[in-house]
Amino acid sequence: MKTIIFYRSSYRGNTLKIAESMADALFAELVSIDSNPSIDLSDYDLIGFGSAINFAAHDIRLQRFVSSQNLKGKNVFIFSTRCRPFLGAYHSPLKKIIERKGGIIVGEFSCRGFDRTGPWVLMDGYNKARPNDRDRFEARLFAEKLRWKLHPLALIYKNPVTRCSEGITMRRKGSDIIAGNKVVFLNTSTCINCGKCIKICPMHIFALKDTVLPIDEKNCIQCRLCADNCPTFSIYIQESFLNGLRIALRESFSNKLQNNYKAEDNHH
């Protein structure tokens, strides 16, 4: 998923800290609007816009920048840092601009940021040490959830089964062939057979046949290491509470998962 994040962080660097955490989780390009960027957004799957909240809205320069973009049909998220304890309607002006430009808002995030303006000079600033480590962690978690929500295989389990190969269920998405039954899905059309998933999976779900295939998804523990390390984003784990419960019950009452995990030496 090709992602770009535009930000303005002109005061204490509060917004930049949040933008960096999100960019790291989304493998995104990070661009300051202060550089007057002129970037063709047609190839991007996800676009982020963020700044501090000034006078109950995003930075006016960011609003003007967004107003100049063609966002028709684009997935967009917004974020901010703010002085006040509650977000309220501070995102509304930017959201209206994005909707007017045809963008689809898929998420928003906000946290407190250090402020030493106006009356706060009397107490040498408000929200000292914010954003802190927890704020940056929550920003990263927001971005990771967003990336997972928009993964191209997120709804593949709803597609009808077309055939089975080597005991693996196959589905189609356009011209792509997707291997997987209920939990682990792998796009065999975009997979480059690099073998990273085979090496990193602690439960040995994957094996190389003519191509890499998820041969033993019943042992998947939803750790998502395979998906997070796939260079072509070809793997998706269908996470669910029921699947997590299945894992917990198998771990409690069966040694199959433990034995599969302990078999690591035989696989590497």
Image (cartoon, rainbow, N blue to C red):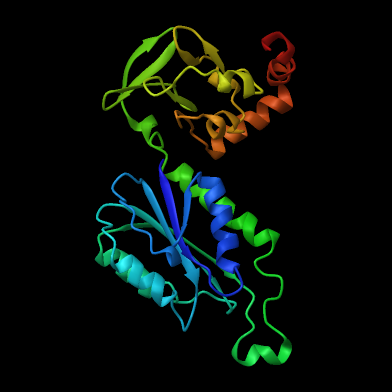
- In percent of width and height, residue 205 lies at 57, 19
Q: Is residue 86 above or below residue 20?
A: below
- Work out which residue is located at the far front of the displayed protein and give it: 35
Residue at image position (37%, 18%) is: 170
Q: How many marks?
A: 0
Which residue appears at 52% of the width and 36% of the height? 239
Task: Name which residue lies at 64% across and 62% down.
Answer: 135
Q: Is residue 37 above or below residue 87?
A: above
Please say if 186 is above or below 29: above
The image shows residue 88 at horizontal and vertical percentages of 48, 77
Nearest the viewer among 198 and 184 is 198
> Would you say 58 lies left or right of 21 here?
left
Which sits in the foreground, 107 or 162? 107
Q: Quadrant of residue 114?
A: bottom right
Q: Nearer the viewer, residue 213 or 52?
A: 52
Q: Which quarter of the rendered picture does the N terminus lie within?
A: top left
Work out which quarter of the rendered image holds the C terminus and state it.
top right
Compared across the picture, whether 18 is left or right of 147 comes to right
Question: In the displayed structure, would residue 264 be above or below residue 44?
Answer: above
Residue 68, by quadrant, is bottom left
Residue 214 in the image, given as x and y percentages of width and height: 50, 18
- Residue sitting at x 51%, y 74%: 87
